[in-house]
Amino acid sequence: MHRVLLFFFLISLTVSFGQNNAVIEGNVINERSSEIKNVEVLLVELNLNTFTDKEGNFRFDNLPHGVFTLIPFYEGNSFSPGYADLRETDFKEITLTLEMTSFDLEEVRLQAKSRSEQLKTSAIKAEIIAIGSESQRANSVEDLVNRAPGIKIRNVGGLGSASNVLVGGFTGNAIKFLYDDIPMDYLGSNYGLTKVPTNTIERVEIYKGVLPTKLGIDALGSAINIVPKTFNKTSGTISYEFGSFGTHIGTINATAKITDQLFIGTNSFYNYSKNNYKVDDLPYRDPVNGHTTYIRERLFHNAFEQLSIEVFVQGRGLSWADWIELKINSYDLSRDIQNDPYTRARPFGEVYRTEKGSFIPSLKYKKYFLEDRLNLNQFLVLSNIEFELVDRAKNVYYDWKGQAHPNTSGSEMGNFLLENGYLNNKLTQFTSRTNLNYLLNDQFQIESNTIFSHFNRKSNVDELNPKGTDYNKLISNLGLNGIFFENKLETNSQIKFLYSHLSGKYESSEDPTSSKIEVKEINNKGWTFSQAFKYTFNSSHFVRISYENTFRLPEQRELFGDNNFIVANYDLRPEKSNNINLGYSFSSEKWNFETNTYYRNTKDLIRLKDLNQYEATFLNLDHVRGYGVELEAAYQPIPHLNITGNITWNDFRLESSRDPFLNNQHFKNARVANLPFYYGNTGVSYNFIELLNLNHDLTFFWDYSYVHQYYLDFIEKQFEPDGFLGLWGQSKINTSRIIPVQHLNNFGMVYSRDMGERSLSFSAEVKNIYNSKIYNEFKMQSPGRNYRFKITYTF
């Protein structure tokens, strides 16, 4: 309660500050001094925008005092900025001219901060990956995100594979994924980091620590937001990418401007790969003599195929809506299942899964009210997703050479729960997100964000719940942003209310030979609080610090299981965590340096626990505490040569556990298993345009990634390697459960040629140049050396 009172005490401070209500009025003209209507004008420092009327006039009301940058945008182009000095006056009139030669956005960023820079330098810590020219490279969103400081993505490898992301000490479901500020649940697995092509998105926002009020989710302190591309005129991109292991990727992203206020478009892509790369140490049992040897063979039942279609109709600058968008998403993906999720002990030759979201409509509405002081952003979506698992092969098993052999098993996976080897789950979800932003005065802005989600899941194997199981989540938060001391101090204060309700019948017995059916009505609720500060010393230095006590509501899959290998557990409690983050940033003409440290104290950590050979369930097991450090630097010694690098070290250890195998003093303070604790990246790129006096862009790049060895299991602290931070030496116990040191090198080039308003680019990349062995957290090998080629046409 005292935290709620503190929050409202902060709000009450606003009465002590004057209402300055400064105003900027202006008009936009072309070189012939003619007024131009429907020009977007961006006020950079406050991230406000408006459009000119039919006389070319625009107005910004209720502004704080200060110096502001205004940039006009028209038909997708940005033009020369203007400046308004309101430090000693309440009114300023300005004229902006649209010259025939527009500025490139990179030139504008030299004079005013871009949207990405505003996010990155705010009170809330964010890594902003601006896709831009990166979309021309033959790489994935996963590749780009994996090079960011503090981030490590671990997957089995290959296009479309499942991935586990480590961000700021958190992993698994503790990290939330969003698509354009909306939780991504309604799109199923369609927009995973290993699936979405770079051409479809504008940027990726990676938040660490306190999350922005606009997100309003229940992450423990980390979130990844994918922001799609938008165009202000008739334009788009088409790309085709192909490479090793039968990989083909095609994208089309286009917007057609029908009128000044009506736009239609699509963001669609197609993925296919055989994923038939070679893997070492596969167990092969000779059918003649019964001896088991370990061989190197090519995966033979590992293909992935996906079609994702997104179409939209947008209205912009209407009298009753600044932005309204109706969007339809439809996708269909299928994946062969080659082996168990966590081991390659045995191969499957006929098991596969599919996922379909045939018709997912959504509606987005934005509007400014009260002389642009109040901003409403409403989003609604209804999705129906169907999941299928097929395991109908009987009396047969496959070896790692792809040969079938007779067997007495009723299915390949050996799961006795699936009738006729078929599982069908249908997930219906409705989500509403309401965001309100109100400018109180020249120093304070208040924001609220409320997300309500309803889930209903039906399954052909759930005879206890023929109408499905229901799960409701409500997350509502209130934030206050403040600016003090001539914009040197920025603050963000938030309180958040979380509530969930689930109901249904489930089998609660952990003994597969007995049955115990229970009817559950469970409510979880609670309040959280967070506070973030950023202080800017000058244009080169700033510091951030934040604190939050938060918790994460269990996901529907964690509660309901998957009606296959994961058993339901309605008694799951929320995960709770206290987090502290501290960061410092320095920048100069050639250098940029940033460090970020964090402390986490997480209780009731949810972990998947094996029950028997065929079943597992999610349980609140562990209490984990630890801290980490991230270092990031960028250097440009000469024009067009960029050098970047980052290092992450963390020390997260087990305080206690309800797992009977771990809840003793032997494993207290042991490092968390399956979690890398030291890793880093470096990269070099050079554009030869000036050196070779080219009339086109030619860039070569090299990226290197390092992951230090870590362990599959908990290792007692006394047996850890000696040396500084545990980075030298070997474990003092003999164990083969070590994930070895990993070195990954990628090299490539991008050639791009402008043709007026169109451009054509070609990219080639060699991944894992030295054919090193790369593993995920369960020591499953990823692809070796492979190639990618990409052609991109922009119009």
Image (tube, grey):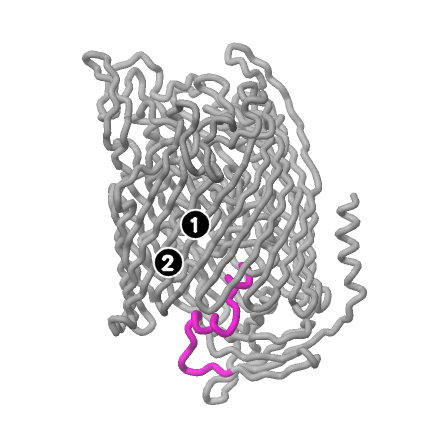
Report which quarter residue 749 is drawn in. bottom left
> Which span of residues is magenta-colored?
97-120
Crowd tier of the residue under label 1, counting other residues whose Cα lies within 10 Å: few below 14, some 14–19, many 20 or above: many
Q: Position of residue 301 (x, y in %)?
A: 28, 31
Report which quarter residue 332 is drawn in. top left
Q: Quadrant of the C terminus?
A: bottom left
The residue at which mark 1 appears reads as 145
Q: Position of residue 671 (x, y in %)?
A: 51, 32
Crowd tier of the residue under label 2, counting other residues whose Cα lies within 10 Å: few below 14, some 14–19, many 20 or above: some
For the residue pair 117 and 382, the one nearer the viewer reads as 117
Residue type indicated by callout 2: Glu
Q: Residue at x 36, y 45 (%)?
A: 307
Question: Which residue occupies the extreme top position in the image?
Answer: 513
Q: Quadrant of the N terminus?
A: top right
* Mark 2 to mark 1 CA distance (whole Å): 12 Å
Q: Position of residue 153 (x, y in %)?
A: 43, 42
The residue at which mark 2 appears reads as 134
Q: Residue at x 35, y 19 (%)?
A: 411
